[in-house]
Image: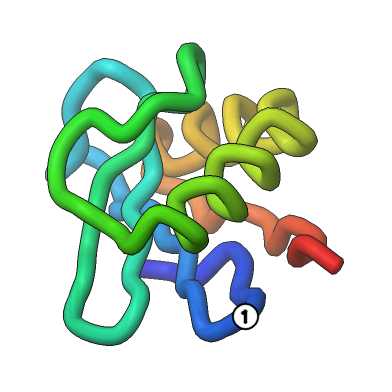
């Protein structure tokens, strides 16, 4: 599962198809926490993160929504996603 971005101890990853499933989403890892975020709505679908990290991830997702959808389309075709700029 490729890492597409990392910032403030947060790791953002996407799985390759066919192991993935709709809706378009990415996986977030922070310490012992993990969550999945819907790219279209920029909301946590499942899992849990601390409040501060949730805000950071969702702000980042809104800024990079087009890039995330492009990466989703790549992984759905079995291709490697591009790296996306971290939150700064």
For residue 35, above or below residue 45: below
- From the viewer's side, name the closer residue of 64 and 15: 64
For residue 68, above or below residue 4: above
- From the viewer's side, name the closer residue of 73 and 8: 8
Q: Which residue, as the protein is rendered here, is positioned at the far front?
A: 51
Q: How many marks?
A: 1
Q: Residue at x 29, y 85 (%)?
A: 31
Density class for disc 1 (Cα within 10 Å; few <14, some 14-19, many ≥20) is few
- For the C terminus, the image quarter is bottom right
For residue 7, above or below residue 69: below
Residue 83 in picture, x, y percent from top left: 70, 63
Residue 10 in picture, x, y percent from top left: 49, 74
Q: Residue at x 18, y 82 (%)?
A: 32
The part of the image, by quadrant, that contains residue 28 is bottom left
Q: Which residue is mark 1?
A: 8
37 sits to left or right of 36: right
26 sits to left or right of 86: left
- Looking at the rendered structure, the secondary structure element under dot 1 is loop
Q: Which residue, as the protein is rendered here, is positioned at the far right?
A: 88
- For the N terminus, the image quarter is bottom left
Residue 49 in picture, x, y percent from top left: 29, 59
Q: Residue at x 50, y 25 (%)?
A: 42
In the rendered view, how is the structure colored?
rainbow
Residue 35 in picture, x, y percent from top left: 24, 52
Q: Residue at x 78, y 35 (%)?
A: 63
The part of the image, by quadrant, that contains residue 13 is bottom left
The part of the image, by quadrant, that contains residue 33 is bottom left
For residue 72, above or below residue 11: above
């Amino acid at each position: 599962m490729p890492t597409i971005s990392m910032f403030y101890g947060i790791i953002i990853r996407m799985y390759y198809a066919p192991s993935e499933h709709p809706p378009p989403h990415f996986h977030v890892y922070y310490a012992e926490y993990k969550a999945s975020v819907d790219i279209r709505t920029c909301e946590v679908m499942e899992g849990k993160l601390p409040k501060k990290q949730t805000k950071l991830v969702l702000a980042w997702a809104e800024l990079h929504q087009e890039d995330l959808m492009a990466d989703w389309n790549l992984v759905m075709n079995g291709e490697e996603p591009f790296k996306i700029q971290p939150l700064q």
